Amino acid sequence: MSSSFHPGAWVEEFIADLRTFATGSYLGEGETEHWEGFYDPACLAELEQILRTLIADMATVPVAETLIDARTKLQEFNAQHQDAVLEEEEYGDLQEFFQQLGHLHGLDNSQIPLLMEEDEENNIPPAAPMIYLPEDPEDT
């Protein structure tokens, strides 16, 4: 893992990318005539708060527990927005974020909860992503 990982900066960039997608600001002139966003960009403030709370809680709550709680909050958030904000690509980015945070706090990959697993046959995410708990939560 790179020592240049800055969780706060990562969150800012992630939210900015989602805002760009939600507002269509990446589209050129004339490309927005029939364009409609998939979700209200105002919901991104809630997502940002979930991620910033995760970062803050990593210092005071057992790390694996904090990641599991954040995973649940992310799933609930996305469900509230018709699963339109966090799709497979975003879950992949968030998984990398979870791994980097976990590594910063001494976890190895086996102790970091998965946000989603793909159905290998159909290459689609399941309805309820799987999580893996450390064998002994006291080790976190």
Image: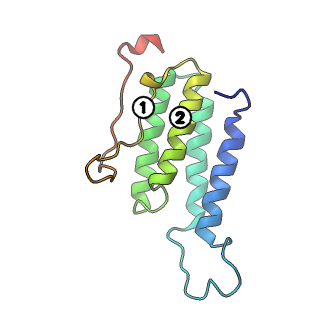
Three-letter amino acid code of the residue under disc 1: Pro
The amino acid on which the numbered mark 2 sits, given as a three-letter code, is Phe
Q: Is residue 59 visible?
A: no
Horizontal and vertical percent position of residue 52: 62, 40
- Residue drawn where x is 72% and y is 26% of the image: 3
Say which residue label 2 marks: 98
CA distance separating discs 1 and 2: 8 Å
- Local crowd size for mark 2, using a 10 Å CA cut-off: few (<14), some (14–19), many (≥20): many
Instruction: Look at the numbered disc 1 and give the secondary structure of its residue.
Output: loop
Q: Quadrant of residue 104?
A: top right
Instruction: Find out whether the residues at labels 1 and 2 contact each other: C-beta distance under 8 Å.
Output: yes
* Residue 127 located left or right of residue 43: left
First in residue order: circle 1 vs circle 2:
2
Q: Is residue 11 above or below residue 109?
A: below
Res 113 label: 1
With respect to residue 115, does 127 lie above or below?
below
